[in-house]
Image (tube, rainbow, N blue to C red):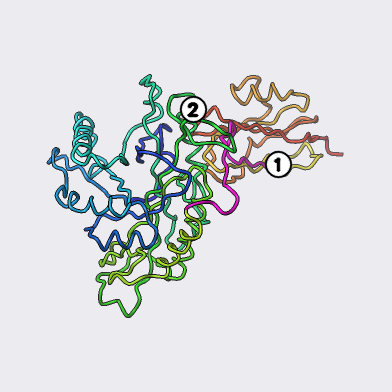
C-alpha cells in the first residue's frame, strides 16, 4: 500500500516523479466509488459490490522484468471479468513494475511499454488503466514538443499522515492528503499550463475543453480487530488503529468530501475485506470472516442517499500566480533607537519557498524594491536570503545599527515548485532616531 505522493515527486517539479497516470475511458458527473482489491473474485464478491453500491474495482497488474512477457494471473482474470461486466462493475487495471528501480535500466521503459500493450490486447474489454511512472514528467513533456495529452486522470492515494488522523487533517507539505488536493492541482498547473495536456477545472468556469480529473484510487483506515474474532487473524499489529464506528464516520466523510470536489471522478477504498495477517491491512468494509463492519452500512447508506452527487457546496479551486497562502508579521514599532542591532520578522507559506528580504529607505519605490529582491540591484541597506519549508519561521537580517532615517522591511517569496509564482510584502515605514 503506497503512501500519499510527495509534491516534490509529482509532474516535473525538478525531482523524480513517483505517481500515476490514469487513462480513463470516459467520465460522468457523479462520483464513482469502489474498492482497491486484488484478491480472488467470484460471484459473491461482485454481489457484495452491487449491494453496497460500489461501481469500480481497481486491480494491480504487476510487471516482472525477469519475465517481461508474462501477464500475471491471466486465466484467473479472464474467469471473473464476465462476472464484473454482468454486475456493472468497472474494472481499472493499475499496471506498474514490481519495484520502481525496475524501470531504471536502459531498455526497461520500452519493455514495460510493450508489456502494457500486451496486457491491453489480452484484455480488450478493459478500457481504464492507471500507469505508474518515474520521470520529470512536466519538464520532459515540454521538452518533447508533444502536441497531444498524456493523461486524462491523475491517480493519487490520499492516505492520512497517521492512521488515527481524521480525513479533515490532511498531511504536511510536500505530501498531500484529502484536504490538500489543491496542492496537487496547483503542481499540475505549474507543470502543464499552456501545453496540450489538460489541467484541472477551475472555479465555475464553463468549458467544452477536456479537463483533468482525479482518480483517488486508494484510501483507508486500519481498524482494531474485535476480541471475538482475534483467532481469525495472526501476527502483531504494527500501528495504532481506530475503532469500527470511527472508521464508518471517516468513510462517510471521505465520500461526501470527494463528491463535492468537481475535480474528483473516482474514489476507491482500500480493501473490501480484511487481510488476515495483522502486518498487512485491516481496513475493509468486511471483517476477515465476511461479516459487515459499520462502515459497510455507512458507505451503502451514503451512496443510496447521494448517488455520488454533491449535496452541499462544491469545493472550487483556481490556480494562483503567487505563493500559496503566504504569511508575514513584521513585529516592528514605529520608532526605534539607533542603538538597535536586531532585525527580525516572521514569514511563511503553505509550500516550500525561497526568499530574499531586506531593509530599504522608506522613499524606495515598490518597483525598485521588487527589482532589488529579484536581482540584487539596487542593493538593500541590509539583506538576507534563504528557504522556508512550508511553515512560519522567524527570519533575521544582519546585526547592524542603522543611521537615523525612515525605513521599511520587505520580503519576496518564490515557490520552489514554480519560481515564477512570487509574493512581495513591504512593511509600513518605521523611524530610526538618535537616542536623546
Q: Which mark is residue 193?
A: 2
In what element is the residue under mark 2?
Answer: loop
* 162 in the magenta segment: no
Instruction: Locate residue 90 relative to residue 14 in the image: left or right.
Output: left
Q: Report the number of numbered marks.
A: 2
Instruction: Locate residue 290 relative to residue 163 in the image: left or right.
Output: left
Q: Which residue lies furthest to the front in this view?
A: 86
Q: Which residue is drawn at 33% across and 65% down?
A: 282
Instruction: Locate residue 26 relative to residue 377 in the image: left or right.
Output: left
The image shows residue 368, relative to residue 11, as above or below, that is above
Query: Which residue has dot 1 on it?
Result: 330
Magenta stretch, overall SS: loop
Tell which tag, 2 or 1, sits nearer the viewer.
2
Q: Nearer the viewer, residue 99 or 255?
A: 255
Q: Nearer the viewer, residue 243 or 171?
A: 243
Q: Which of 113 and 302 is in front in this view?
A: 302
The residue segment tinted magenta is 308-329
Q: Which residue is drawn at 66% across and 41% down?
A: 328
Indicate the quadrant where residue 283 lies. Answer: bottom left
Q: How crowded is mark 1: few (under 14 residues within 10 Å), some or many (20 or more)?
A: some
* 314 in the magenta segment: yes
Q: How far apart are marks 2 and 1 (CA)?
A: 35 Å
Q: Nearer the viewer, residue 71 or 120?
A: 120
In what element is the residue under mark 1?
Answer: loop
Q: Residues within 10 Å of mark 2 (few under 14, many from 20)?
A: some
Indicate the quadrant where residue 150 lies. Answer: top left
| Residue 372 rendering spot, x and y as whole percentages | 64, 23
| Residue 25 rendering spot, x and y as whole percentages | 35, 38
| Residue 311 rendering spot, x and y as whole percentages | 56, 54
* Badge 2 or badge 1: first in the primary sequence: 2
Amino acid at each position: 500500500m503506497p503512501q500519499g505522493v510527495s509534491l516534490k515527486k509529482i509532474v516535473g517539479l525538478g525531482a523524480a516523479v513517483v505517481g500515476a497516470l490514469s487513462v480513463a475511458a470516459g467520465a460522468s458527473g457523479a462520483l464513482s466509488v469502489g474498492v482497491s482489491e486484488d484478491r480472488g473474485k467470484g460471484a459473491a464478491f461482485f454481489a457484495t459490490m452491487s449491494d453496497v453500491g460500489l461501481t469500480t474495482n481497481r486491480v494491480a497488474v504487476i510487471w516482472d522484468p525477469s519475465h517481461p512477457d508474462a501477464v500475471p494471473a491471466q486465466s484467473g482474470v479472464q474467469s471473473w471479468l464476465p462476472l464484473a461486466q454482468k454486475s456493472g462493475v468497472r474494472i481499472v487495471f493499475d499496471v506498474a513494475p514490481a519495484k520502481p528501480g525496475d524501470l531504471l535500466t536502459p531498455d526497461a521503459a520500452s519493455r514495460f511499454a510493450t508489456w502494457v500493450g500486451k496486457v491491453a490486447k489480452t484484455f480488450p474489454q478493459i478500457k481504464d488503466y492507471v500507469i505508474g511512472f518515474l520521470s520529470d514528467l512536466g519538464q520532459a513533456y515540454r521538452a518533447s514538443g508533444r502536441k497531444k495529452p498524456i493523461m486524462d486522470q491523475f491517480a493519487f492515494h490520499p492516505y492520512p499522515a497517521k492512521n488515527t488522523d481524521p480525513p479533515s487533517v490532511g498531511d504536511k507539505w510536500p505530501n498531500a492528503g484529502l484536504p490538500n488536493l489543491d496542492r496537487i492541482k496547483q503542481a499540475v498547473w505549474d507543470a502543464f499550463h499552456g501545453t496540450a495536456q489538460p489541467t484541472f477545472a477551475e472555479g465555475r468556469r464553463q468549458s467544452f475543453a477536456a479537463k483533468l480529473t482525479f482518480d483517488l484510487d486508494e484510501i483507508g483506515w486500519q481498524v482494531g480487530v474485535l476480541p471475538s474474532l482475534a483467532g481469525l487473524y495472526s501476527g502483531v499489529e504494527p500501528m495504532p488503529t481506530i475503532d469500527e464506528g470511527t472508521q464508518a464516520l471517516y468513510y462517510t466523510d471521505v465520500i461526501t468530501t470527494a463528491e463535492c470536489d468537481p475535480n474528483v471522478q473516482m474514489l476507491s477504498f482500500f480493501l473490501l475485506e480484511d487481510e488476515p495477517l495483522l502486518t498487512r491491512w485491516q481496513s475493509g468494509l468486511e471483517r476477515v470472516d465476511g461479516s459487515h463492519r459499520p462502515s459497510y452500512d455507512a458507505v451503502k447508506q451514503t451512496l443510496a442517499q447521494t448517488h455520488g452527487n454533491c449535496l452541499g457546496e462544491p469545493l472550487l479551486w483556481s490556480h494562483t500566480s503567487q505563493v500559496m497562502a503566504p504569511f508575514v508579521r513584521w513585529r516592528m514599532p514605529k520608532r526605534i533607537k539607533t542603538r538597535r542591532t536586531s532585525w527580525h520578522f516572521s514569514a511563511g507559506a503553505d509550500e516550500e519557498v525561497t526568499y530574499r528580504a531586506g531593509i530599504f529607505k522608506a522613499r524606495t519605490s515598490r518597483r525598485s524594491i521588487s527589482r532589488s529582491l529579484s536581482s540584487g540591484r539596487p542593493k538593500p541597506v541590509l539583506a538576507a536570503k534563504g528557504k522556508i519549508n512550508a511553515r512560519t519561521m522567524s527570519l533575521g537580517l544582519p546585526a547592524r545599527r542603522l543611521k537615523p532615517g525612515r525605513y521599511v522591511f520587505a520580503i519576496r517569496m518564490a515557490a520552489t515548485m514554480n519560481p515564477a509564482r512570487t509574493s512581495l510584502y513591504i512593511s509600513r515605514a518605521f523611524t530610526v532616531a538618535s537616542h536623546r
